[in-house]
Amino acid sequence: MKHILIIADGIVAKHFLQRIGETFIRSNEYTVVTQDRSILPDKESAHFITYQFDPTSYIKLSKLLKREYDDIFIVMKNIVDAEGSYRNIRRLLPETRITFFNRWDITLDDENLINLNANEILASRLYDFLPNVPVVAQNVGLGQGEIMEVLVPFGSAYVYRHIGTIIQEKWRIVALYRNSQLILPTPSLMIKPNDVLLLVGKPAVLESVFKAIKQELGQFPAPFGQSIYLFIDMEKESKPCIDTCLEEALYLQRRIKGRKLIVRVTRPSDIETLERLKSIENDDIECIVDFRYRDFETLIKEDVKNYNIGLILCGSDIFSQRKIRQVLYRLRKPVLQLSEIQLRHLKKAVVILSEKKRMEVISSTVFDVASQLGLDVELLDYEPDGNFEKKSSVIKHYENLATIFSKKMRLRQEKSNPVRQLSKESDFLQVIPFSQNILSSRFLAYMSADVEKLYFKLSKNPQLFIPVEME
């Protein structure tokens, strides 16, 4: 976690803090020093620590600076206060990076200082509005964050992935820079460490993509969305199934921190369950009851649009219906089919290897989910002819990710169909590509040797279906 100190005063500082409060990064902790508490955001997050004192006081500031900070921002309205705060900090922390909002053209000789000249920034922005003047790259578009440049770090889940395996919905990789050379992306182009990606898309989507590329484990269900969504149909599901799904949803929401849980109930008939749902509502849990008996597709499409859903939960009574699976498939959202085996009792996430492209698509999600739930990762390579070299590149890809994320991974190689062996185990979460194979009728699937089509034989365990195909 990054620790950031902000020395704040004035209207610019107020807008700056408000912006942080609305779009703060959960991996940052902010310490704010101000004399005027009215500039603080209306809703302060748990990631904010605030102090009210004069930052030009060396004695008071020295007590605060006994801890280490990764970055320091000075945003003040008065030149004497701003320069005085800067001098105090430099006496105590000579090498820490400082970003200084400079409204007065002050010259400060400091190699660890980012001197933001407010007058130059405003003049540059005004210049862009002159007619017949070319616009520089950083100001292309709406200026709302719809164009983003991202450096891919060595530890990213996007490293060594082919661009064609990355689902780009509402965003696109439009260019790649490597060794100071521009490369136009193709599906077969592999992303390497220190590549710079130029992304275009909706600003809110790009924020999630940025986090995914930087690979901060614990971001799932991003980039698919933010909220966790439980669907309950009281007519089609038994009460034990509903109770189990609700308990599992609450457990998952506690493990995947910072995510809101949306519980959608249709065809309400159990007053006891409705009263329980009402009792658990808070800022992070919202229960919505449909009394109009609308169909599943109408409800879930409406909720996906309104609540930025990133993960859909449902019981096996729901997911077993082929029409519902077809609707879920078209939504392009991960779906977790819950079961009587509780998530808290699982020990590993199991992936049965299949087509290379699909395996790359789900790989980062496998490790992210395993990390958040405290699971090991197990790959199962099924080759009836014993030629286990066929999937060596996929296995190498997973081994690289396991090393990057310091995650324990085991490889099992089987000549016989692994479904029979796995059906005897009850301590795993199966992670499955949500392909068209999952839409097959179960009757026809019995006559198939395709392991993905036989997923339902392992449905006594929780199963996570990750979208891998674009319409």
Image (cartoon, rainbow, N blue to C red):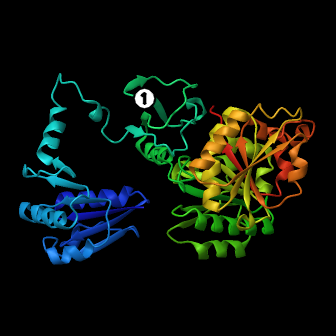
Quarter of the image for residue 355 reads: top right
Task: Give, as a three-letter code, the residue at label 1.
Answer: Arg
Residue 5 at x, y percent in the picture: 28, 64
Horizontal relation, residue 382 to residue 287: left or right: right
Above or below, 123 relative to 19: above
For the residue pair 355 and 406, the one nearer the viewer reads as: 406
**Quadrant (top left/top right/bottom left/bottom right) for the C terminus:** top right
Above or below, 87 relative to 179: below
Horizontal relation, residue 138 to residue 193: left or right: left
Q: Residue at x 58, y 31 (%)?
A: 162
Q: Which residue is drawn at 79% across and 68% down?
A: 239
Horizontal relation, residue 208 to residue 117: left or right: right
Q: Can residue 429 be seen in this view?
A: yes
Q: Residue at x 33, y 42 (%)?
A: 144
**Quadrant (top left/top right/bottom left/bottom right) for the N terminus:** bottom left
- Label 1 secondary element: strand
Above or below, 418 relative to 37: above
Q: Is residue 302 visible?
A: no
Residue 152 at x, y percent in the picture: 46, 40
Mark 1 surroundings within 10 Å by alpha-carbon count, few (fewer than 14), some (14 through 19), many (20 or more): some
Q: Which residue is drawn at 32% across and 67% down?
A: 68
Residue 147 at x, y percent in the picture: 37, 36
Quarter of the image for residue 468 reads: top right
For the residue pair 15 and 298, the one nearer the viewer reads as: 15
Q: Which residue lies furthest to the right in this view?
A: 447
For the residue pair 425 and 202, the one nearer the viewer reads as: 425
Above or below, 37 relative to 326: below
Residue 128 at x, y percent in the picture: 19, 32
Horizontal relation, residue 113 to residue 67: left or right: left
Per the image, the residue denoted by label 1 is 178
